[in-house]
Image: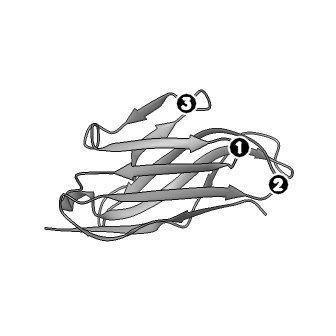
Amino acid sequence: QVQLVESGGGLVQAGGSLRLSCIASGSIFSIDSMGWYRQAPGKQRELVARILSDDSTNYADSVKGRFTVSRDNTKNTMSLQMNSLKPEDTAVYYCKAVMTTATRQIWTDYWGQGTQVTVSS
């Protein structure tokens, strides 16, 4: 089975930093784009940052200059360095990867279970 597992969430004060990690495991053939999304209570899930297979990136306007996404293709991992955190960054953060696998050889979205990030004021 293919799975994505996030880690690194937690409680931090405003102005602080956290680093989220996501690891993809299982019978993976290839990974195209990877991304971080978040969902706050009562709100829709939104894109935070995305990194393509050529390492090009794009960010939500609300996190530009504060968050940095990176990936290690040799380890099937992705990270999100979050600095200068604000209370409005509080949400469950999800990892998503577009992958082909041994059992599904077309590009498919896979999601992690999410990790909670809480920023106190």
Q: Residue at x 62, y 57 (%)?
A: 23
Residue 15: x and y in percent read: 18, 57
Residue 42 horizontal side relative to residue 105, left or right: left
* Quarter occupied by the C terminus: bottom left
Q: Is residue 96 above or below residue 1?
A: above
Q: Residue at x 45, y 67 (%)?
A: 115
Q: Residues within 10 Å of mark 1 (few under 14, many from 20)?
A: few
As shown in the figure, which amino acid type bears the numbered disc 3?
A: Asp
Marks 3, 2: nearer the viewer: 3
Q: Residues within 10 Å of mark 2 (few under 14, many from 20)?
A: some
Question: What residue is shown with label 2?
Answer: 27
Name the N-terminal-most of marks 3 and 2: 2
Question: What residue is shown with label 1?
Answer: 74
Residue 72: x and y in percent read: 62, 43
Question: What residue is shown with label 3?
Answer: 55
Residue 90: x and y in percent read: 28, 63
